[in-house]
Amino acid sequence: MFLGTHQPRLDDKGRLFLPAKYREELAEGLVITKGQERCLYVFPVEEFQRITEALSTAPVTAKAVRDYSRVFFASASDETPDKQGRITIPQSLRQYAGLGRDCVVIGANTRLEIWDSQAWDTYLQAQEQAFADLSEEVLPGIL
């Protein structure tokens, strides 16, 4: 499970330090791909394989499945962190997410998300009230 908010910097070569607490879990490899709201999703290999299996059972006759799968897999890049715990984010993914030097890496349960720092602040400000309003709808009887 991935939790928390971290603020690494992207270096001139497009490399980003993974949060130290997750380096061991991701040491064998990970997959980075486009996420919703112009962020990047970072999956451990096992979780990416689980998603791949789920999508492989979805009907290819459904246009939404084809469209989602094409973008999701075509933009995916498998990476292995270096000895310092850095990953290289491909230029096309950096462009998609609008990543500048200052980034935010958030834990999102089964994945990490990488956001441009300003984009994350804007998103969070817009969503804080919605978060408060949705608790009963998303988690009825739990919170």
Image (tube, rainbow, N blue to C red):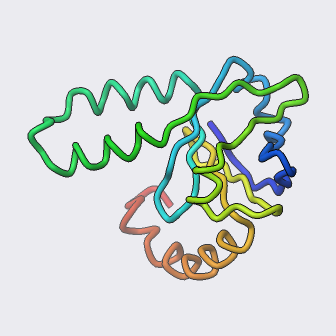
**Rendering coords of residue 139 (x, y %):** 42, 59
Q: Is residue 18 above or below residue 131?
A: above
The answer to which of 125 and 16 lies nearer the viewer is 16
Left or right side of 2 for 88: right
The N terminus: image quadrant: top right
Q: Residue furthest left?
A: 61
**Rendering coords of residue 127 (x, y %):** 55, 76
**Rendering coords of residue 142 (x, y %):** 46, 56
* Residue at x 60% of width, y 40% of height: 42
**Rendering coords of residue 58 (x, y %):** 19, 34
* Residue at x 76% of width, y 27% of height: 81
Q: In this view, does 135 lie above or below 2?
A: below
The answer to which of 56 and 74 lies nearer the viewer is 74
Q: In which quarter of the image is residue 80?
A: top right
* Residue at x 22% of width, y 43% of height: 66
Left or right side of 44 for 84: right
Left or right side of 103 for 1: left
Q: Residue furthest top?
A: 28
Q: In which quarter of the image is residue 21?
A: top right
Left or right side of 94 for 96: left
* Residue at x 64% of width, y 79% of height: 122
